[in-house]
Image (cartoon, grey):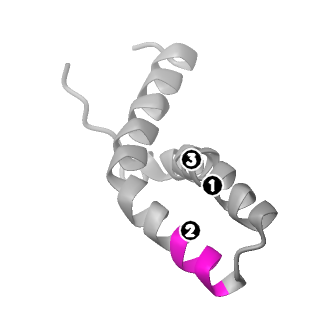
Amino acid sequence: MVFEREPGYWLGALYFSYALALALVLPVTAWLMHRGVESATIVVATFAQCALWSPLTFRYARLVWMYLDQGLDPR
């Protein structure tokens, strides 16, 4: 499938990337807050998780965006 779109096409995938990252990071962050861990440690853990999960969320956010685009506007 040739998939060349206009500039800025992947901008919508940012929203999905944010939602995926939030879904992956929020449970651990909430658990750390519930355990009474220091705020600085929670921030470091959250940034570390975001760094580790970013390749996965980047790829799958674009995949979800492509499927949504093809579902709403088939070519």
Q: Tell me if label 1 and label 2 are in contact, CB under 8 Å.
A: yes
Instruction: Kindly report which numbered mark, 1 or 2, lies closer to the viewer in this rendering.
Output: 1
Is 71 above or below relative to 30? above
Label 2: state its secondary structure: helix
The 10 Å Cα crowd at callout 2, few under 14, some 14 to 19, many 20 or more, is some
Q: Earlier in the sequence, mark 2 or mark 3?
A: 3
In which quadrant of the rendered view does residue 66 lie?
A: top left
Instruction: Classify mark 3: residues with Cα within 10 Å, few (<14), some (14-19) or many (20+).
Output: some
Q: Amino acid at mark 1?
A: Val
Real-space Cα separation, disc 3 to disc 1, in angstroms = 8 Å
Bounds of the magenta segment:
40-45
Residue for point 52% across, 52% down: 14
Q: Residues within 10 Å of mark 1 (few under 14, many from 20)?
A: some
Residue at position x 40%, y 39% in the image: 62
State the SS at label 3: helix
**Residue at the (69%, 64%) spot, across then down:** 32
In the image, farthest residue toward the left: 2
Q: Which mark is residue 28?
A: 1
Residue that numbered label 3 is attached to: 24
Tell me the CA gap for discs 1 and 2. Answer: 8 Å
Residue matched to label 2? 46
The Cα–Cα distance between marks 2 and 3, rounded to whole angstroms, is 10 Å
Residue 52 x %, y %: 37, 59
The answer to whether residue 2 is magenta is no
Does the magenta-highlighted stretch encompass residue 42? Answer: yes
Query: Depth check: 47 or 62 in front?
Result: 47
- Callout 1: SS: helix
Task: Determine the main secondary structure of the stretch shown in magenta.
Answer: helix
Residue furthest out toward the bottom: 40
The quadrant in which the C terminus is found is top left
